[in-house]
Amino acid sequence: MASPARTSSESTRKLGGLAALGLLIALSPIAFPSTFYYEIGSSIFIASLAVVGLNLLMGFAGQVSLGHAAFFGIGGYAVAVGPAHLGLPPFLCIFLGALLSTSVAWFVGRPILKLRGHYLAVATLGFGFLVSMVLTNEARWTGGPDGMSVPRLDILGFALRGSRFWYWTSGIVLLVGVWLALNLMDSPTGRALRALHDSEIAAAVNGVDVAKYKLAVFVISAAYASIAGSMGALSDGHITPTAAGFLGSIELVTMAVLGGLGSIYGALLGAALLKSLPQVLTFLHDYEHMVIGAIMMIVMIFMRDGIMPSLARLFARKTA
């Protein structure tokens, strides 16, 4: 059992991290030279939300997913298809999309989470391809490869739109998502997930229901991705099947690995890095992707655990 002093220290650290993140979100617009930077900020926050969920699955529970963008796409198409074909309000469709994503995750996760290693990776990859193909081929519902427009969010007759609105909304939702993830990790469920990551056999011997917790974290991570997908579609006003495609899944995994698997704030850093680098390196024109690739290789060579855990270790050594 953790001592009261240690528990108090962990709570203080958690609140301090959330406060720092909140201040960063609140104060960043002071330095924005144009409204375009609000769009970049909201895209970072939305990607971060999806990566936080994926980090719960990969970084804490140790389960590989190469098809996680499928849930992002389901959430995005929920706020497009629901209003266009069913006459449902977009705000309600955010929650219906999350419900659909978690239901699909529960149904699909039961068989595929029995697999391990590269078998699990290939199974989740196949699931991602399946969702992407359905969204592409069901043109009558989804608009096909060209996608479809997404109606603007409307609550009580007030149209909610604009880059500033989505910057603040996505920032607040991200704060809530991070807070929930941190609390989950400090709970008995979080300790069970960490035990799974270390060794499923040892966790089972110590009374952890391996199948139950693997499925639970898969469903939770799907909800994060779905809500992020809905927000992304609503802020962009358009969605295409590429949102659920293979490259989208690889991008999410790359963000999680670069920032640091097993680190909630590392997920935020990884998302911010990959979303902002293309904007920073536009002056390089044709060499932009080459430089981004080189940066990723350098990080993985010298910071094998990801940026945030490596920096935290370095700071701990210097203050010791």
Image: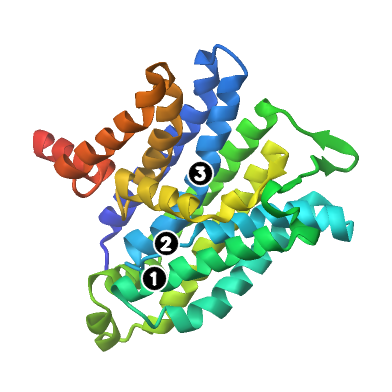
| Left or right placement of residue 51 versus residue 140 in this view | left
Viewer-nearest of discs 3 and 1: 1
Asked if the residue at tag 1 contacts the one at tag 3, i.e. Cβ–Cβ closer than 8 Å, the answer is no
Residue under numbered circle 3: 47
> SS at mark 3?
helix
Please give the name of the residue rendered at 46% of the width and 28% of the height, measured from the top-left corner: 24
> SS at mark 1?
helix
| Left or right placement of residue 176 versus residue 188 in this view | right
Asked if the residue at tag 1 contacts the one at tag 2, i.e. Cβ–Cβ closer than 8 Å, the answer is yes
Please give the name of the residue rendered at 79% of the width and 60% of the height, measured from the top-left corner: 141
In the rendered image, the vertical position of residue 277 relative to residue 227, given as above or below: above
The C terminus is located in which quarter? top left
Please give the name of the residue rendered at 34% of the width and 25% of the height, measured from the top-left corner: 287
**Front position in the image: 68 or 56:** 68
Indicate the amino acid at tag 2. Leu
Q: Of the residues under marks 2 and 1, which one precedes in the sequence?
A: 2
Q: Can residue 88 be seen in this view?
A: no
Tell me where residue 191 appears, x and y as whole percent: 33, 69
In the rendered image, the vertical position of residue 23 relative to residue 13, given as above or below: above
Viewer-nearest of discs 2 and 3: 2
Distance from label 2 to label 3 (Cα)? 16 Å
Q: Is residue 85 visible?
A: yes
Residue under numbered circle 2: 66
Indicate the amino acid at tag 1. Val
**What number is the disc on residue 122?**
1
Q: Of the residues under marks 2 and 3, which one precedes in the sequence?
A: 3
Tell me where residue 132 appears, x and y as whole percent: 59, 60
Indicate the amino acid at tag 3. Ala
Tell me where residue 146 appears, x and y as whole percent: 70, 47
Distance from label 2 to label 1 (Cα)? 7 Å
